[in-house]
């Protein structure tokens, strides 16, 4: 009877451990600076950030932290000190922001608009200085940009001033709700979706698919002070804020820590996420764990 109970206990314990996952990276998407000058009803500064946050929210390993900025703050030119303070208050690891240079549709016309005319539509999206910024230190993890134009030159001519589909959509952009169902049915909305899917993939690569940590002779626990664990890995070892690292003894995982502050070339401060035994100096450190995946 005793042996049966022990076997059941071991299997239940193992199953519970498999369900433990690495904490996701907490990201706050801040308003963008709007230089596009779109004349419609959209509030691009916040509309762009909300759409990007929605795309990223479906990615395992990234947790989007909702923020509430009043309009006076959101409408300003990017203020990193304000963004850092707000993101720190909601315990984010990084914040993201950028600049909207172009966002809209240009129409070129040729011929008499009241008889036979030709139309060409260019869908412009240019976002620059899309920066992923570490909370606290202000270090920039990555800077991205997007510049995508798509030209629609319908073969059809505008006969006797009769509006074509592109003409109607061009006018409707001034009133349609941003990122609505109707918006994504329109040619420009389809272009927006494609561009933002590419941008989302690039951000995910920067946040989750990082270069491996350099595990040299200093890759071990140096000291423990209360909840703080000081480890012999730092900036030169490619450790980054928010990294989740396994602690090893004789090749077996005995704990997990999360990096909270990079202190030097080979020194960081971390906090304990999990442990199966009392931690001590000298424990080896393994390669970073991937957010959203099992710790084991």
Image (cartoon, rainbow, N blue to C red):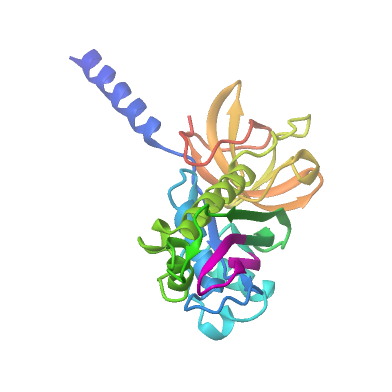
Residue 87 image offset from top left, x and y in percent: 57, 67
**Number of marks drawn:** 0
- The residue that appears at 52% across and 41% down in the rendered structure is 291
Nearest the eye: 173 or 13:
173
Nearest the eye: 73 or 272:
73
Residue at the outermost left position: 1
Q: Is residue 173 above or below residue 193?
A: below
Q: Is residue 201 above or below residue 175?
A: above
Q: Is residue 192 above or below residue 178?
A: above
Tell me if residue 90 can be seen.
no
Q: Is residue 227 above or below residue 37?
A: above
Look at the image and tell me in which quarter the N terminus lies.
Answer: top left
Nearest the eye: 219 or 170:
170
Tell me if residue 61 can be seen.
yes
State the predominant SS element of the stretch in magenta. Answer: strand
Magenta residues span 98-124
Residue 209 image offset from top left, x and y in percent: 62, 38
Residue 160 image offset from top left, x and y in percent: 46, 70
- The residue that appears at 47% across and 62% down in the rendered structure is 166
Quarter occupied by residue 287: top right
In magenta segment, residue 176: no
Residue 191 image offset from top left, x and y in percent: 52, 54
In magenta segment, residue 112: yes
């Amino acid at each position: 009877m005793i042996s049966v109970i022990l076997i059941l206990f071991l299997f239940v314990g193992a199953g519970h451990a498999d369900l433990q996952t690495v904490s996701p990276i907490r990201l706050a998407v801040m308003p963008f600076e709007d230089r596009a000058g779109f004349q419609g009803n959209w509030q691009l500064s916040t509309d762009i950030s909300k759409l990007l946050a929605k795309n990223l929210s479906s990615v395992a390993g990234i947790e989007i932290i909702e923020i509430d900025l009043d309009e006076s703050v959101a409408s300003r030119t990017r203020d990193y000190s304000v963004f850092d303070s707000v993101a720190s208050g909601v315990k984010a690891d990084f914040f993201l922001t950028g600049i909207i240079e172009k966002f809209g549709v240009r129409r070129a016309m040729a011929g008499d608009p009241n008889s036979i005319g030709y139309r060409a539509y260019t869908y412009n999206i240019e976002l620059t200085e899309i920066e992923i910024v570490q909370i606290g230190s202000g270090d920039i993890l990555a800077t991205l940009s997007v510049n995508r134009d798509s030209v629609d030159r319908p073969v059809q001519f505008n006969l006797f001033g009769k509006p074509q589909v592109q003409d109607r959509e061009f006018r409707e952009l001034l009133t349609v709700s941003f990122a609505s169902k109707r918006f994504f049915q329109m040619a420009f909305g389809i272009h927006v979706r494609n561009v933002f899917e590419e941008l989302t993939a690039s951000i995910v690569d920067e946040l989750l698919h990082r270069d491996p940590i350099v595990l040299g002779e200093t890759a071990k626990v140096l000291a423990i002070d209360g909840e703080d664990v000081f480890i012999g890995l730092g900036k030169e070892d490619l450790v980054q804020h928010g990294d989740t690292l396994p602690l090893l003894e004789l090749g077996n995982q005995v704990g997990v820590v999360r990096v909270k502050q990079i202190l030097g070339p080979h020194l960081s401060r971390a906090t304990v996420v999990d442990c199966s035994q009392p931690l001590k100096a000298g424990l080896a450190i393994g390669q970073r764990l991937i957010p959203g995946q099992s710790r084991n």
